[in-house]
Image (spheres, rainbow, N blue to C red):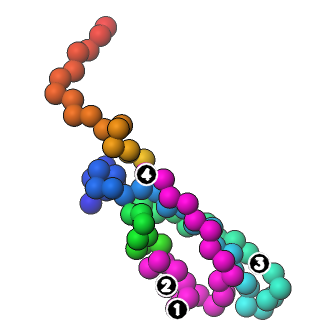
Amino acid sequence: MTEGEMLLKGYGVTTAEMFYRIPDYTNVLNSFVWQDYDRAPDHERLFDFIEFWQREIEGALHSVRFTHRKLIAPGEWRHVTGEFPLH
């Protein structure tokens, strides 16, 4: 699916900041930023990534903070049937 098709089907940009502990230094928190197209309120891709992190990466997650923004709102999309070029 192209980005335009995803936006028209209700996808938006989800950005997540994950705080995790380094295995050798458990008192130190690092952060990782993840961003992808996802659908609210289910956030399937975000939760799939969090499950992947917990399964495959040694750094234990401390917390996850995320936001979601639809790039095309219902009032912003219009069907255009013609175009008038101006010089």
Q: Which disc, if any, is residue 29?
A: 3
Residue 32: x, y in percent?
A: 64, 70
Are dots 1 and 2 in contact, CB under 8 Å? Answer: yes
Q: Residue at x 17, y 23 (%)?
A: 82
Q: Residues within 10 Å of mark 2 (few under 14, many from 20)?
A: few
Q: In what element is the residue under mark 1?
A: helix
Q: CA distance from mark 1 to mark 2?
A: 5 Å
**Looking at the rendered structure, which numbered label has been put on residue 55?**
1
Count of numbered circles in the view: 4
Check the picture and name the quadrant holding the N terminus: bottom left
Task: Choose mark 4 or mark 2, whichever is in front.
Answer: 4
Q: Residue at x 55, y 60 (%)?
A: 67
Residue located beneath label 2 in the image:
52
Position of 10 compared to 16: left or right? Answer: left
Q: Residue at x 69, y 82 (%)?
A: 62
7 inside magenta stretch? no
Q: CA distance from mark 3 to mark 2?
A: 19 Å
Depth check: 72 or 20 in front?
72
Tell me the mark number nearer the camera, choosing from 4 and 1.
4
- In magenta, the rendered stretch is 47-70
Task: Inspect the image, locate mark 2, and give the three-letter code of the amino acid beneath it.
Answer: Phe
Residue 10 visible to an observer of this rendering: yes
Residue 37: image location, x then y, percent = 42, 61
Say if 85 sits above or below 43 in the image: above
Q: Nearer the viewer, mark 3 or mark 4?
A: 4
Answer with left or right where residue 20 lies relative to residue 13.
right
Which amino acid, by three-letter code, is at mark 1? Arg
- The disc labelled 3 sits on which kind of residue? Leu
Is residue 68 rendered magenta in the image? Answer: yes
- Whether pointer 4 and pointer 1 mark residues with C-beta atoms closer than 8 Å, the reply is no
Question: Mark 1 packing: few (<14 Cα in 10 Å), some, or many (20+)?
Answer: few
